[in-house]
Image (cartoon, rainbow, N blue to C red):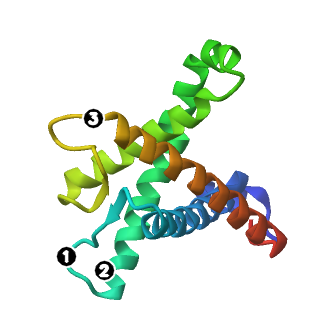
Amino acid sequence: MIGQSQIPIYFRDGTIKHMKRFLVSTVINGLGIWLVSAIIPGIGLKPYGGDALWQLIVTLLVIGAIFGLINSVIAPVIKVIAIPLYILTFGLISFVINGSLLLLVAWISQQLSPNTFTIDGFTSSGLTITSLGWAILASIVMSICSFIGRGIFKALRIL
């Protein structure tokens, strides 16, 4: 039997569990981004480097990881700051916040490679109302996809 002191520090306290959760979340986010780019006409996705299947998969995983990092680091701070707006709008401001975070993901992915993950109306010269509308719609679809994906992975006892 291995004692607690013999287990390396990076394996204690569920670090592997957190990493597995992040990787599964990245896959779910990647699938959600693929679904969003397939069904919403204002969202575009162009793979890094070419049109091969593996390049599309890598692109989806990179954008999914960016989305996961933004949702785990920036989103909680913004949501705490926006508590008065949540109260005033009965929580409806969450759609605008999630859409804005998706616009941030699109901007970061465009810094890596131009026109990789695009939202119509969101250009280098600025932001338009239509781009926020597409982003809000995309964030709703992403939320539904994430809800279903997490439910499936929990039912399979992967998460």
Q: Which residue is mark 3?
A: 127
**3 or 2: tag closer to the N-terminus:** 2
Q: Does 5 sit above or below residue 57?
A: above
Q: Alpha-carbon distance for marks 1 and 2?
A: 7 Å
Evaluate if marks 1 and 2 touch, with contact meaning CB atoms under 8 Å apart: yes
The residue lying at 28 percent from left, 87 percent from top is 52
On screen, residue 20 versus residue 66, left or right, reads right
Residue 25 is situated, as x and y percent measured from the top left of the image, at 59, 61
Give the quadrant of the N terminus: bottom right
- Residue type at mark 3 is Leu
Closer to the observer: label 3 or label 1? 3
Q: Does 31 sit above or below residue 137?
A: below
Q: Alpha-carbon distance for marks 3 and 1?
A: 26 Å
In the figure, residue 125 lies in which quadrant?
Answer: top left
Q: Which mark is residue 29?
A: none
**1 or 2: tag closer to the N-terminus:** 1
- Residue type at mark 2 is Gln
The residue lying at 41 percent from left, 53 percent from top is 66
Closer to the observer: label 3 or label 2? 3
Residue 44 is situated, as x and y percent measured from the top left of the image, at 33, 63
SS class, disc 3: loop
Q: Which mark is residue 49?
A: 1
Residue 131 is situated, as x and y percent measured from the top left of the image, at 35, 42
In the figure, residue 129 lies in which quadrant?
Answer: top left
On screen, residue 121 versus residue 94, left or right, reads left
Q: Which residue is mark 2?
A: 55
